[in-house]
C-alpha cells in the first residue's frame, strides 16, 4: 500500500511551480498504478494553452472558478467545484483561472514527473516577469 500526503509534497521535486500553475504529484509512473494523480492549482487571471498529445487526462475542480475553451471551435465551459472535464480525444484547450482553482488531475498513461520541463503540450500564454520553465 502506498500512503502519501499533499503536505509532504510541497517543497520537494514532486511539486512543480510555474507562473500559471503549481502541481503536486501524488502518484507517478514509478508507483506502478497505471495512472498518475496530481493536485494542480491554476492561478487567478492566467490563461494556459494545453495539448496533451500522448496522454488522456481527467480533471475535477475542487475549489475556485474559471473556464475551459475548446481549441479549435471556441466552445467555452464554465469550471466550478464539482465540474469535471475529461480530455478523451487529446483535446487542445485554453484553461483560464478566474479565481485560483484547485484541481485533482489523473493521467493515463501516467506522467513520469519529467514531462513538464520538456513542455509536454503545456505552453503558457500569460506569464509573470519572472517566467520559468513550464
Ligand atoms: C489542470 C491540469 O491540466 N493539470 C495537469 C497537471 C500538471 N500539468 C502537471 O502535474 O504537470
Image (spheres, helix red, strand yellow):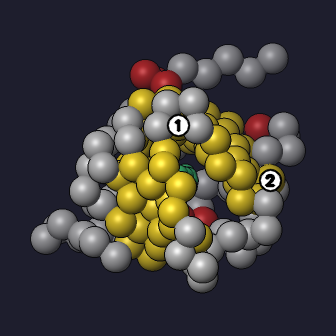
From what the image shows, is residue 47 above or below residue 53? above
Between residue 110 and residue 97, name the one nearer to us: 97
How many C-alpha atoms fall within 10 Å of the one at disc 1: few (<14), some, or many (≥20)?
many
Quarter of the figure with the N terminus: top right
The residue shown at (71%, 59%) is: 87
Q: Which residue is mark 2?
A: 108
Between residue 70 and residue 49, name the one nearer to us: 70
How many C-alpha atoms fall within 10 Å of the one at disc 2: few (<14), some, or many (≥20)?
some
Quarter of the figure with the C terminus: bottom left
Q: Which residue, as the protein is rendered here, is positioned at the far bottom?
A: 72
Disc 1 + disc 2, Cβ < 8 Å = no
Write down the quadrant of residue 52 in the picture: bottom right
Distance from the alpha carbon under mark 1 to that under mark 2: 18 Å
Between residue 73 and residue 26, name the one nearer to us: 73
Write down the quadrant of residue 72 in the picture: bottom right
Q: Which residue is mark 1?
A: 61
The residue shown at (35%, 66%) is: 47
Q: Does residue 118 appear to the left or right of 34 in the view shown?
A: left
User: Disc 1 beta carbon < 8 A from ligand 1?
Assistant: no
How far across and how far down the image is residue 61, in percent? 53, 37
Q: Does residue 96 appear to the left or right of 90 in the view shown?
A: left
Q: Does residue 16 appear to the left or right of 130 in the view shown?
A: right
The residue shown at (58%, 38%) is: 83
| Local SS, label 2 | strand
Q: Is residue 123 visible?
A: yes
From what the image shows, is residue 4 above or below residue 65? above
The residue shown at (34%, 76%) is: 125
How far across and how far down the image is residue 48, in percent? 41, 67
Amino acid at each position: 500500500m502506498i500512503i502519501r500526503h499533499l503536505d509532504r509534497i510541497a517543497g520537494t521535486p514532486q511539486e512543480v511551480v510555474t507562473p500559471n500553475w503549481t502541481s503536486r504529484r501524488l502518484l507517478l509512473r514509478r508507483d506502478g498504478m497505471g495512472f498518475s494523480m496530481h493536485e494542480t492549482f491554476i492561478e487567478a487571471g492566467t490563461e494556459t494553452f494545453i495539448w496533451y498529445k500522448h496522454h488522456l487526462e481527467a480533471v475535477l475542480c475542487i475549489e475556485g472558478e474559471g473556464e475551459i475553451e475548446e481549441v479549435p471551435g471556441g466552445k467555452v465551459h464554465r469550471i466550478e467545484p464539482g465540474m469535471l472535464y475529461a480530455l478523451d480525444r487529446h483535446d487542445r484547450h485554453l484553461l483560464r483561472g478566474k479565481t485560483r482553482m484547485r484541481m485533482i488531475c489523473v493521467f493515463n498513461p501516467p506522467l513520469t514527473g519529467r514531462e513538464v520541463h520538456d513542455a509536454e503540450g503545456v505552453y503558457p500564454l500569460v506569464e509573470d516577469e519572472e517566467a520559468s520553465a513550464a
